[in-house]
Image (cartoon, rainbow, N blue to C red):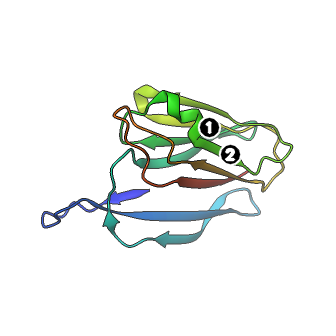
């Protein structure tokens, strides 16, 4: 999650990253287990992740990663890495251009508490040819 610094005195746009770690409780709900915030830093050129959101069901869990600019669809598939699935199958990746969102659908039937890491690499480009300035990664726990 990028938080822009909108102060009038700032000569450049700055952002901070927030990471919220959730853990599943014994009742199946989620609780916040940790929060980390980076110091403000200048925002670099290229597409930027606005947010990542999980959804779906245990049979078809999805991770939607939204961007602030139109992406070059030809660069999406090569930029996404999904790890931690083991022998549980493979993920489906698609780009929804109207919402500027990459949607990763994880295979159903993953064992409980499986950690799946999704990384968007700097080979991702926007339609102007600007590359993602640094890799973005998020972890989902089934």
Q: Are marks 1 and 2 in contact (CB under 8 Å)?
A: yes
Considering only order in the chain, which callout, 2 or 1, is on the residue closer to the N terminus? 2
Which mark is drawn over residue 51? Answer: none
Coordinates of residue 98 in the picture (x, y in percent): 41, 26
Question: In the rendered view, does 59 fall on the left or right side of 6?
Answer: right
Of 48 and 37, nearer the camera is 48
Q: Quadrant of residue 109?
A: top right
Q: Residue furthest left?
A: 9
Q: Residues within 10 Å of mark 2 (few under 14, many from 20)?
A: some
**Helix, strand or loop under label 2:** strand
Q: Residue at x 33, y 50 (%)?
A: 45
The residue tagged 1 is 104
Where is residue 6 drawn, in percent x and y?
A: 22, 60
Please name the residue shown 49% across and 28% down the image: 73
From the image, tell me which residue sits under label 2.
Answer: 82
**Residue at figure coordinates x 46%, y 49% from the top left:** 51
Up-down relation of residue 126 to residue 41 (above or below):
above
């Amino acid at each position: 999650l990028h938080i822009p610094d909108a102060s009038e005195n700032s000569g450049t746009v700055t952002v901070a990253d927030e990471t919220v770690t959730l853990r599943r409780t014994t009742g199946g709900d989620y609780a916040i287990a940790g929060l980390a915030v980076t110091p403000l830093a200048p925002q670099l050129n290229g597409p930027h992740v606005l947010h990542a959101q999980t959804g779906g069901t245990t049979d078809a869990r999805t991770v939607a990663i939204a961007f602030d600019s139109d992406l070059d669809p030809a660069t999406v598939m090569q930029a996404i890495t999904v790890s931690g699935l083991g022998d549980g199958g493979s993920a489906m990746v698609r780009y929804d251009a109207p919402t500027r969102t990459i949607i990763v659908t994880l295979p159903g039937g993953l064992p409980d508490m499986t950690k799946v890491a999704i990384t968007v690499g700097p080979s991702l480009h926007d339609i102007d040819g600007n590359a993602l300035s640094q890799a973005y990664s998020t972890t989902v726990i089934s």
